[in-house]
């Protein structure tokens, strides 16, 4: 017997929580995406699948179970989104930093850790990361990879500043105070355009559905 619950629906399709006798999984389906953007939804799905396969076996990220033309099925991680779980323990950010280092060691950057719903607080108090649609894999870990990896770290430190400000080291404060030139350019030019298109024209925001996504996206 299978029980399914819709967690999220947006321009890129639907995300379902699927409970079966074999266990609980997450299924991303792009078939409901509008025809004019379905190509992008498919590209993001394939990007997520490729990146998660590189991270196969790494605790704290979803594991790929199956990939189809229009769907990705991956493992379910029990937990609350950061803005719900509100991690106050020092160990949470230690585990998040450790997970990020292991991802970077495999040549993967998340590129979307600014959003609190993409970081989970698991039942044991450790961190997990979800939603790898924008993630990228750079086996050579060249200059652009290093810039993106530093932004991953800076976004994690921004969350640490929110929930554990007293634990920030001087080095971490310097990283927070010095975003990359690419990040500065994005904040000054592309981000206002992104927010105008997504929130004003399309009527959705990054935190939409975050209550449900708290368990998984």
Image (cartoon, rainbow, N blue to C red):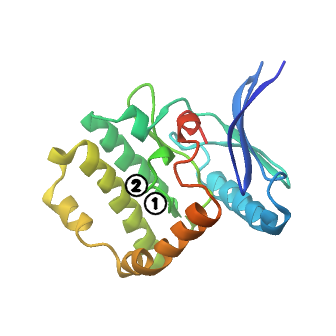
Residue 202, quarter of picture: bottom right
* Tags 2 and 1 touching, CB below 8 Å: yes
Residue 189, quarter of picture: bottom left
Q: How many marks?
A: 2
Q: Residue at x 41, y 81 (%)?
A: 185
Q: CA distance from mark 2 to mark 1?
A: 5 Å
Q: Is residue 88 above or below residue 40?
A: above
Q: Residues within 10 Å of mark 2 (few under 14, many from 20)?
A: some
The answer, for residue 135, to whether it is visible in the render is: no
The answer, for residue 3, to whether it is visible in the render is: yes
Q: Nearer the viewer, residue 144 or 113?
A: 113
SS class, disc 2: helix
Residue 85 percent across, percent down from the top left: 40, 32
Mark number for residue 104?
Answer: 1
Mark number for residue 158?
Answer: none
> Which residue is labeled 2 in the image?
101
Q: Nearer the viewer, residue 49 or 214?
A: 214
Question: Which quadrant of the figure contains the C terminus?
Answer: top right
Q: Is residue 101 above or below residue 182?
A: above
Residue 200 percent across, percent down from the top left: 57, 64
Q: Residues within 10 Å of mark 1 (few under 14, many from 20)?
A: many
Question: Which quadrant of the figure contains the N terminus?
Answer: top right
SS class, disc 1: helix
Q: Nearer the viewer, residue 8 or 150?
A: 8
- Lateral position of residue 212 relative to residue 34, left or right: left
Q: Residue at x 82, y 22 (%)?
A: 2
Q: Residue at x 48, y 72 (%)?
A: 191
Q: Nearer the viewer, residue 56 or 8?
A: 8
- Lateral position of residue 135 relative to residue 87, left or right: right
Extreme-front residue of the structure:
200
């Amino acid at each position: 017997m299978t029980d399914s619950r819709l967690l999220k629906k947006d321009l890129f399709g639907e995300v379902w929580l699927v409970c079966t006798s074999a266990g609980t999984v997450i299924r991303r389906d792009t078939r409901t995406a509008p025809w004019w953007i379905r190509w992008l939804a498919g590209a993001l799905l394939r990007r997520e699948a490729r990146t998660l396969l590189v991270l196969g076996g790494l605790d704290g990220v979803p594991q790929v179970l199956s990939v189809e033309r229009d769907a990705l099925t991956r493992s379910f991680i029990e937990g609350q989104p950061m803005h719900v779980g509100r991690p106050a323990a020092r160990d949470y950010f230690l585990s998040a930093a450790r997970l990020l280092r292991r991802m970077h060691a495999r040549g993967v950057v998340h590129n979307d850790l600014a959003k609190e719903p993409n970081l989970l607080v698991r039942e044991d108090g450790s961190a997990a990361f979800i939603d790898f649609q924008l993630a990228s894999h750079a086996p050579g870990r060249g200059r652009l990879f290093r810039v993106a990896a530093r932004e991953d770290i800076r976004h994690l430190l921004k969350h640490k500043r929110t929930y554990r400000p007293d634990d920030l080291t001087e080095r971490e404060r310097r990283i927070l105070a010095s975003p990359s030139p690419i990040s500065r350019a994005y904040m000054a030019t592309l981000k206002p355009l992104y927010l105008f298109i997504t929130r004003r024209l399309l009527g959705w925001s990054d935190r939409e559905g975050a209550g449900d996504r708290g368990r998984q996206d």
